[in-house]
Image (spheres, helix red, strand yellow):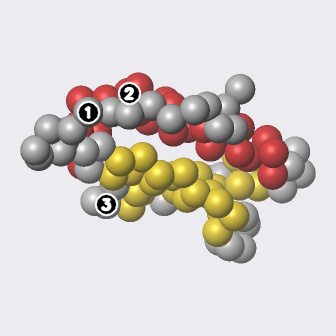
């Protein structure tokens, strides 16, 4: 079973030293979403201070497989209205 590493980055880097054994890349993608969700839930207030967070997923050779990015931003100035587009690609 392959081992995947879920490194977290904001303005600092928090390497995953242990990794997690998962059955395949699809399972690693699901776990990355869970890790990101837990990170956002546990640190929701400080997320706004950091600006951007990433979860970088690597294999046991530290080859980057994929990443998830989250960014917080203030409202635009001057204020703008949101114009909804048709639902493209969403369930």
Q: Which residue is mark 2?
A: 42
Numbered circle sitting on residue 12: 3
Question: CA separation, marks 2 and 3?
Answer: 17 Å
Closer to the camera, 20 or 12? 12
Instruction: Give residue 55's position: percent from left, percent from top.
Output: 51, 52
Element at label 3: loop
Among numbered discs 1 and 3, the one appearing first in the sequence: 3
| Other residues around mark 2 within 10 Å, as few (<14) / some (14–19) / many (≥20) | few
Question: On screen, 11 above or below 51?
Answer: below
Kindly identify the residue that appears in the image at 35 percent across and 48 percent down.
Answer: 71
Q: In the drawing, does residue 17 fall left or right of residue 20?
A: left
Of tags 1 and 3, which is closer to the observer? 1
Instruction: Give residue 74's position: percent from left, percent from top.
Output: 19, 42
Question: CA separation, marks 1 and 3?
Answer: 34 Å
Q: In the drawing, does residue 28 fall left or right of residue 48?
A: right
Element at label 1: loop
Closer to the camera, 75 or 80? 80
Element at label 2: helix
Question: On screen, 86 above or below 8?
Answer: above
- The quadrant where residue 39 appears: top left
Residue 17 seen in render: no
Residue 45 seen in render: yes
Among numbered discs 2 and 1, the one appearing first in the sequence: 2
| Other residues around mark 3 within 10 Å, as few (<14) / some (14–19) / many (≥20) | few
Q: Which residue is mark 1?
A: 81
Kindly identify the residue that appears in the image at 71 percent across and 55 percent down.
Answer: 4
- CB within 8 Å, label 2 to label 1: no
Seen from this angle, which residue lies furthest left? Answer: 78
Q: Quadrant of the C terminus?
A: top right
């Amino acid at each position: 079973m392959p081992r995947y590493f879920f490194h977290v980055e904001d303005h600092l880097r928090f390497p995953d030293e242990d990794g997690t054994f998962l059955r395949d890349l699809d399972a690693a993608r699901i776990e990355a979403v869970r890790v990101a969700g837990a990170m956002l839930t546990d640190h929701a207030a400080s997320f706004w201070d950091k600006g951007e967070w990433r979860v970088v997923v690597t294999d046991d050779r530290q080859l980057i497989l994929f990443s998830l990015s989250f960014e917080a931003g203030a409202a635009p100035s001057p204020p703008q209205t949101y114009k909804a587009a048709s639902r493209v690609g969403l369930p």
